[in-house]
Amino acid sequence: MTSTRSKRQLLLDLDFEDEQLVVAEPLGGQSCAAAVGKTALDSATDDLMELIVESDNMDRAWKRVRANRGAPGADGMTIAQFPDFIRESWPTIRQQLLDGTYKPQPVRRKSIPKPDGQGERLLGIPCVLDRVIQQAVLQVLTPIFDPTFSESSFGFRPKRSAHGAVKQVQSYIKQGYRYCVDMDLSKFFDRVQHDVLMSRVSRKVRDKRVLRLIGRYLRAGVMVEGLLVSTEEGTPQGGPLSPLLANIMLDDLDKELEHRGLKFVRYADDFLILVKTYRSARQVFGSVGRFLTRKLKLVVNRQKSSLGKTDGVEFLGFRLVGRKGEIRITAKNLAKFKARVREITSRNRGISMKRMIGELSSYLRGWTGYFALASTKSVFSRFDKWIRRRVRMCYWKQWRYSRTRIRKLMQLGVDRDTAITHGVSRKGYWRLAKTLGGHMGMTKQWLRAQGLVFVRYLWSELAPLRRIA
């Protein structure tokens, strides 16, 4: 190991150009990407820490963390403050990592509502330094572990997505797998047993320093209202390394299902097992539940777990219906969408229309980009009409005075008499927003010129996503 380390010895000088982390190139001249690729192929995992602290790897890690932005950790340091700190501290921190003596800081506890609206999800936000180090570890470990993961695993993996997972389920339904087991893992990220997880990491990682570092991240503790709470189990959500550790933990489940010849799709801790008969579904439900409990020491939520026909099954925010598994958006996500649009277009926000339309269009692009997989054209068209009416209502409220409304309508091409009739009307904003439609000045073309995007057009442009690979 000594000769390998000396061959990859790094310079300790650090510099920052345009707030980008620039570490001197390794003396050996070997790039991090090439070194990691060689490591993955040769399973030379004894000296991973040298690869982690390598200049190219740390530079890419910093750029990724900076791009993701994020809130400060328990130490209060922001992304903007980090360059000044690391410029002077890196040589010491790097040496601690190489010596195996580096100790991560506790994470900051933050709770967010769960997507289903039931309860809260606890996040652990590491400090910026630990996020950079975790990202550097992730970039080295991913080429080692990811190639051996199951083809049916889609969550947090390169070139894989939730869309691929949903389309895989759809393809199985078309093949005649009409029953499924939907098993829910209760608070998976909070209940992972550290010893069970570390035993699986150590199968491919022999560098004791890396194993010790990962273990310290798991046991770093959580700051809750200024008090340090120990973490005896779980892998806190919020750090870059957590998704990979989840996939490593559940890879044994994937291999077990493959060994049994079962059709399944997993995205992080959400997974469906598809079979052809109800009897098979019952058998799989019981045996897989025992495997998760006894082998992986996980807790199965029996109340949320279910088995039954695939017609109407919900997965990753989508609902698959019929014998062809046609993809729809769940009613819950449709309701959340409307609630968010109402929030953005609230008449009482006190912001300019330009800013409001900018926020709304940004949200619509992101939402449509994910749910464009659904084949319900009518839903997107219906939403467009409703959204345009909301925006017209906001314009009408902002114009406020009768003389302003009359002037604005006339500027938009409305004749004087009609503009006066509507300008002095005492009808409510929402009602007038409908009569002030395409024939009354605020046309679709005008709204598009103001920057409003239409989800129907976005959905049409993303048609290739709906093709089954």
Image (cartoon, rainbow, N blue to C red):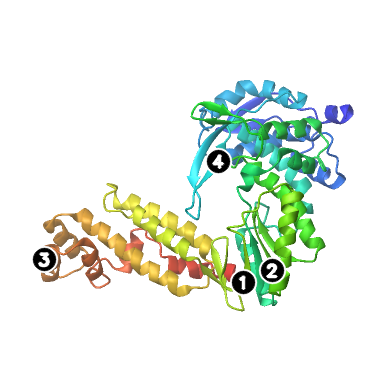
When asked about the image quadrant of residue 334, the answer is bottom left
Q: Residues within 10 Å of mark 1 (few under 14, many from 20)?
A: many
Give, as a three-letter code, the residue at label 2.
Leu
Distance from Cα at disc 2 to Cα at disc 3: 63 Å
Residues tagged 3 and 4 counted as in contact (Cβ below 8 A): no
Q: CA distance from mark 4 to mark 1?
A: 32 Å
**Coordinates of residue 321 in the picture (x, y in percent):** 56, 74
Sequence-wise, which precedes: disc 2 or disc 1?
A: 2
Identify residue for label 1. Answer: 310
The answer for how far apart the CA atoms under marks 3 and 1 are is: 57 Å
Residue appearing at x 61%, y 27% in the figure: 105
Disc 3 + disc 1, Cβ < 8 Å: no
Question: Mark 3 sits on what residue?
Answer: 420
Residue at 52% x, 28% y: name it: 77
Q: Position of residue 380 (x, y in %)?
A: 44, 69
- What residue is disc 4 on? 123
